[in-house]
Amino acid sequence: MRTQVAIIGAGPAGLLLSHLLHLNGIESIVLESRSQAEIEATIRAGVLEQGTMDILSNAGVGARMQAEGALHHGIELAFGGQRHRIDLTELTGKAITVYPQHEVIKDLVAARLAAQGQLLFEVSGVELHGVDTAAPSVGFIHRGEAGRIEADFVIGCDGYHGVTRPAMPGEGRQDFKRDYGFGWFGVLVESAPSSEELIYARHERGFALVSTRTPTVQRLYFQCDPADHVDNWSDDRIWAELHARLENNDGWRVNEGRIFQKNIIGMRSFVSTPMQSGRLFLAGDAAHIVPPTGAKGMNLAVSDVALLAQGLEQFYRQGSDERLQGYTTAALKRVWRAEYFSWWMTSLLHTFADATPFQREVQRAELECVVSSRAMATALAESYVGAF
Ligand SMILES: Cc1cc2nc3c(=O)[nH]c(=O)nc-3n(C[C@H](O)[C@H](O)[C@H](O)COP(=O)(O)OP(=O)(O)OC[C@H]3O[C@@H](n4cnc5c(N)ncnc54)[C@H](O)[C@@H]3O)c2cc1C
């Protein structure tokens, strides 16, 4: 098989890149290890910045998102028994939209298939060859048969555990990493949203987050031991923990309902540089991870591939690789801002096992400053809506 751009991974990064290239008349083939049903059912992110909305809408895949996404003009910070609203729109003129990542995936898959895009599901054994030459290739197995794609470029959009980052030449590489030592226990609940806006709660027992996915499904999280197991948590124990962490003085309570999914994710920050080598480029979680406290992961995946699409368009239309050469520098500028914000939100709102009494009091004082100082609230709001 021959194509211009071979893309590994059909997450938001890989699918959107393939679609943006198609709109510019550039051919691509996407290889995905999971089935279509699986990628369309994996519940993950949900917060879209305005910039992400604009990119998806301009690419012609925003109709359902515009119709069904919920526009949020603020978030709440809860601590000390009180809830405090950060008015994102008043402070920044912008808002965020809650529209589940798997719905974005469905929209992108539908657009690729409608355009007869080449999207191969359930491939295995993906191997990269010759990425430091002008003629890279990708070997893989599909439906029991070995295949090979000859391409001009290979783009790694295969997430944190993928095969493309390990295939990057080791020389000159630098990885930056922070493990927080805690995770998030996430539940999906069949019930009406408890709150119109997201609530980020700090409590002595640990962090909790009240989020929504649809008018009938809530996404709730609480800080946990990353080595814990979902089987250790009965529904009653989960509700008791959530009520304890979300207790407040105004009588508000989180809505209970049938819990139909439980999972635990570890919190980490990670950046691998450079995001390119020869004809191999990385985008999204393949190159960087943020803890979800700042709601930046999917937004970064989208902004990375928007840059790559521009670079590839310049390469094929004008014969210049100037933008592609500048990809790592351009992408990392935004990545590190998001890394900083996600680390700061995580540090502000979680309990740390090794925190001294002094550090706990400083953390509480910082939260009070954020909700009482317009300047600090504005700084949070600007980063949250992605105004950087
Ligand atoms: C619980 C949770 C909550 C989150 N909340 C938010 C949020 O609120 N807002 C936000 O912006 N982000 C959030 N994120 C992060 C967001 O989901 C990710 O950043 C986003 O999915 C990254 O997209 P991606 O396309 O780079 O990678 P992925 O979505 O990971 O896609 C990679 C794809 O590559 C495929 N793949 C992997 N290896 C191979 C291989 N060898 N061959 C072929 N295919 C392969 C995988 O199956 C997958 O489909 C959250 C993440 C989690 C886990």
Image (cartoon, rainbow, N blue to C red):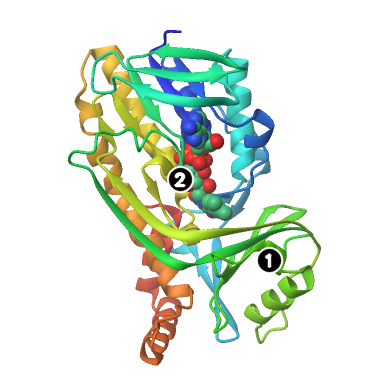
**Which residue is painted at 62% across and 17% down in the image?**
143
Residue in front for this viewpoint, 289 or 126:
126
Task: Say what amino acid the circle numbered 2 marks.
Answer: Asn
Give how far apart the Cα atoms at labels 1 and 2 are: 23 Å
Residue in front for this viewpoint, 18 or 354:
354
Which residue, as the protein is rendered here, is positioned at the far bottom? 357
For the residue with label 1, is its CB less than 8 Å from the closest atom of ligand 1? no
x, y percent for residue 48:
52, 47
| Label 2: which secondary element | helix
**Which residue is painted at 32% across and 21% down in the image?**
312
Residue 30 vertical placement versus 204 (above, below): above
Q: Is residue 314 visible?
A: yes
| Label 1: which secondary element | loop
Q: Which residue is mark 2?
A: 299
x, y percent for residue 181:
45, 68
213 with respect to 45 (left or right): right
Q: Which residue is mark 1?
A: 195
**Which residue is painted at 63% across and 79% down in the image?**
245
126 with respect to 115 (left or right): left
Disc ID at residue 157: none
Residue 134 vertical placement versus 272 (above, below): above
Quarter of the view holding residue 342: bottom left
Tell us which disc is closer to us: 1 or 2.
Answer: 2
Residue 75 vertical placement versus 135 (above, below): below
Q: Is residue 388 visible?
A: no
| Dot 1 and dot 2 residues touching (CB under 8 Å) | no
x, y percent for residue 240:
73, 78
